[in-house]
Image (cartoon, rainbow, N blue to C red):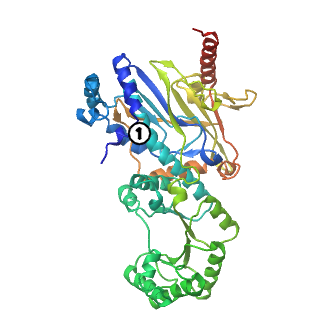
């Protein structure tokens, strides 16, 4: 397998040579990985990929010198190549948990370490996080469109085997009940699901009798397992569902079957066909026979099917999730925010690209009420140890202000709230220092987190925007740097 720590852009290493030769290699840098805007006007994004980032970081420094000579040839690079072959990550990493809900501009991952070590992580880290967060966020949207189970079926549309395996993992974290991908099932211990394709039905002969033989043989070879028969190969209502009923009956499968049994619809008017199939199944005493639907589904189609009263018990979604089809490019970026203790930022003509400087931490504020229990009320990103951070950790009264409208503010009185930091240390001095969580634990964490946001913040269309602010000290630092830089630019001439 390729060492994905080096799935990188060459400029990471051309910059690295300059840092190496100019005495910058040991300066302590802090980089933030964050995104500026969630896709599809979503309120937030779902974190996935941190585990693979940690694995990637651990692979740094595991390639021989001749590997580097293939893209950094020449005697002038000899010393730098030797350095790279021995360079492991020795710094600290702070990250949100997988399954966390992250808002724009909050640091999802913070890297603190020697400049070269931190810089070369940018591309592979973004590659991992942008893929998995795109899939997880889309899966969250699809699963929030219904209270029925949603299966991830997108491996054949994913952008390569790696994307299929880890995309399915991200989808399960963010709400999918299961996946069809066997590698994901084996690697993450979550199992995989699947029954038959149209080719199985047609392999028994292109006839109504052949369809029955396909169903009959499938039941006989999979008795004792969940059974789903694909009924739309020829005609769903005139033969497909009827052949399924006959095959089930002939094999003694009815509502007493201890495991799930059902049919799958993969084409046509799913609202109409599911309603008619439900009526036919019920008329034949198969009230427990489930109806599973696939066919280019996404959150909008599923929402519409639910609105129409479709009799569908479970959905299978492929490319919409596996490729985050409507918005396949997630917008995480990786920006330097501090060098040797001095905060820095990137200034831009585009205000949306203005970043928050300094070593940061985000607190999520929780309040409890008798009706809803623990509810998240606001997030505030602070400079570590600044005045509001100290008040929050001490449980004191504090006020946060809207960054873009300072007349909007909210005060949290002492004793009325609790808070927890979203970024936890996961690597200390180059060594992993956090516990591992199973895929099931990550999914549970996501579900628990999601439940603590209000229904209006969870809706798909025009969600109510959750309060996300920065501390006064971070705001002042940011504006002071901008004002100083603006003054220098205005006075600059040659």
Picture residue at 41% right of the left edge, 29% below the top: 119
Residue 147 placement, left or right of 162: right
Q: How many marks?
A: 1
Picture residue at 52% right of the left edge, 59% below the top: 319
Residue 56 is situated, as x and y percent measured from the top left of the image, at: 36, 40
Check the image and report above or below for 241 versus 1: below
- Neighbour tally class for label 1: few under 14, some 14-19, many 20 plus, Cα within 10 Å: some
Q: Is residue 51 visible?
A: yes
> Camera-side residue: 126 or 11?
11
Residue 113 placement, left or right of 267: left
Q: Quadrant of residue 82?
A: top left
Local secondary structure at mark 1: helix
Check the image and report above or below for 240 versus 181: below
> Camera-side residue: 84 or 180?
84
Disc 1: which residue: 124
Q: Quadrant of residue 475?
A: top right
Which quadrant of the figure contains the C terminus? top right
Residue 475 placement, left or right of 156: right
Residue 446 is situated, as x and y percent measured from the top left of the image, at: 53, 50
Q: Quadrant of residue 235?
A: bottom right
Q: Is residue 25 visible?
A: no
Residue 331 is situated, as x and y percent measured from the top left of the image, at: 55, 41
Check the image and report above or below for 11 versus 178: above
Residue 274 is situated, as x and y percent measured from the top left of the image, at: 62, 76
Q: Residue furthest right?
A: 407
> Camera-side residue: 380 or 86?
86
């Amino acid at each position: 397998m390729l060492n994905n720590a080096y799935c990188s852009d060459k400029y990471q290493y051309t910059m690295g040579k300059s840092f190496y030769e100019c005495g910058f290699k040991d300066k302590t840098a802090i980089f933030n990985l964050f995104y500026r805007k969630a896709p599809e006007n979503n309120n937030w994004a779902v974190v996935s990929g941190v585990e693979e980032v940690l694995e990637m970081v651990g692979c740094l420094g595991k390639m021989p010198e001749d590997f580097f000579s293939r893209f950094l040839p020449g005697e002038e690079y000899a010393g730098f190549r030797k350095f790279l072959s021995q360079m492991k990550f020795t710094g600290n990493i702070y990250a949100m948990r997988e399954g966390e809900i992250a808002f724009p501009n909050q640091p999802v991952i913070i890297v603190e370490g020697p400049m070269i070590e931190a810089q070369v992580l940018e591309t592979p880290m973004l590659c991992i996080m942008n893929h998995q967060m795109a899939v997880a966020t889309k899966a969250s949207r699809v699963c929030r469109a219904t209270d029925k189970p949603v299966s991830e079926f997108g491996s054949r549309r994913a952008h390569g085997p790696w994307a299929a395996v880890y995309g399915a993992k991200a989808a399960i974290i963010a709400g999918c009940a299961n996946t069809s991908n066997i590698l994901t099932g084996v690697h993450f211990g979550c199992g995989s699901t699947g029954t038959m394709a149209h080719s199985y039905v047609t392999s028994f002969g292109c006839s109504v009798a052949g369809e029955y033989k396909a169903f009959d043989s499938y039941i006989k070879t999979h008795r004792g397992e969940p059974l789903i028969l694909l009924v739309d190969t020829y005609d769903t209502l005139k033969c497909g569902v009827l052949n399924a009923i006959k095959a089930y009956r002939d094999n003694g499968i009815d509502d007493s079957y201890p495991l799930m049994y059902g049919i799958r619809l993969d084409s046509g008017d799913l609202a109409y066909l599911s309603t008619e199939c439900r009526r036919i199944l019920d008329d034949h005493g198969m009230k427990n026979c489930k109806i599973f639907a696939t066919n280019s589904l996404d959150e909008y189609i599923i929402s519409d099917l639910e609105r129409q009263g479709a009799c569908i018990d479970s959905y299978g979604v492929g490319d919409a999730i596996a490729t985050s089809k409507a918005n396949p490019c997630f917008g995480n970026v990786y920006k330097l925010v501090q060098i040797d203790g001095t905060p820095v930022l990137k200034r831009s003509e585009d205000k949306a690209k203005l970043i928050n400087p300094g070593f940061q931490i985000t607190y999520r504020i929780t309040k409890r009420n008798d009706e809803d229990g623990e509810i998240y009320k606001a997030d505030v990103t602070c400079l570590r140890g600044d005045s509001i951070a100290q008040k929050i950790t001490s449980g004191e009264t504090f006020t946060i202000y809207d960054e873009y409208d300072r007349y909007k503010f909210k005060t949290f009185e002492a004793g009325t709230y609790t808070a927890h930091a979203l970024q936890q240390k996961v690597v200390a001095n180059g060594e992993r220092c956090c516990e591992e969580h199973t895929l099931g634990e990550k999914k549970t964490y996501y579900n628990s987190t999601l439940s603590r946001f209000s229904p209006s913040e969870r809706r798909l269309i025009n969600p109510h925007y959750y309060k996300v602010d920065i501390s006064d000290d971070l705001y002042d630092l940011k504006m002071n740097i901008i004002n100083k830089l603006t003054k220098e630019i205005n006075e600059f001439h040659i």
